[in-house]
Image (cartoon, grey):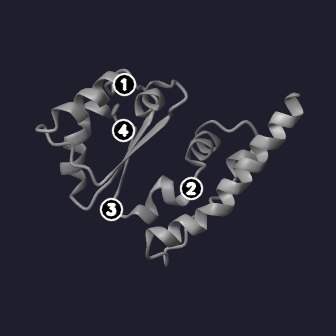
Amino acid sequence: MTESFLTDKSVAQFTVFGYGAPQSDVEAMKLLNKFWGTGEERVMEQFEMIDVRSEGEVKESWDNFINSHHYDFRTSYFDSSLAKNPRRTFESYHQHIQPFTIEESLSKSNPIPEDIKSLEELWEWHKPLIEAEETWKEQSKKGKS
């Protein structure tokens, strides 16, 4: 399943959360090289890294996957694209990089509250977003019939 997401040409951003990309993890690096490719192959895509280590150290670990300056480094999950635009990172990326309308370029984020302390609370916060997506999918199916 991961492979199908990584090879999808619509994937414009890849986020790595707290993983150091050790050279000893040969299988993981092989998988990423095969299905994501290198920074030269992913020219416009954004690579996001969330880690507590220094930016230089983290960037060096992932340098093969990053094209030039197309990366973001964060030391906190709450500063990441995942937390600033939950379940809408792809939309947000395109709205700010290549908006179709003025409204898109001025769209606001829907950040996760920073006082969330557990995965259960995080899941509960996401439920209305997921439910709205499911409702939209059902309505879209009805419209196609």
Q: Which of marks 4 and 1 is in front?
A: 1
* Label 4–label 3 contact, CB within 8 A: no
Which of marks 1 and 4 precedes in the sequence? 1
Whichever of callouts 1 and 3 sits on the residue coming sooner in the sequence is 1
Q: Which of marks 2 and 4 is nearer the N terminus?
A: 4
Q: Using the numbered discs, state the Cα–Cα distance from disc 1 to disc 3 in whole angstroms.
A: 26 Å
Residue 85 visible: yes
Label 4 sits on residue:
69
Local SS, label 2:
loop
Residue type for callout 1 = Phe
Q: Label 2 to label 3, Cα distance in Å?
A: 17 Å
Q: State the mark number for residue 86.
A: 2
Could you tell me residue 24's position as x and y percent? 11, 38
Q: What numbered label is drawn on residue 75? A: 3
Image height check: is 104 above or below 5? below
Q: How far apart are marks 2 and 1 (CA)?
A: 24 Å
Q: How crowded is mark 4: few (under 14 residues within 10 Å), some or many (20 or more)?
A: few
Residue ID at (52%, 72%): 121
Residue 110 seen from this side: no
* 49 displayed left or right of 143: left
Q: Which of 29 and 94 is in front in this view?
A: 29
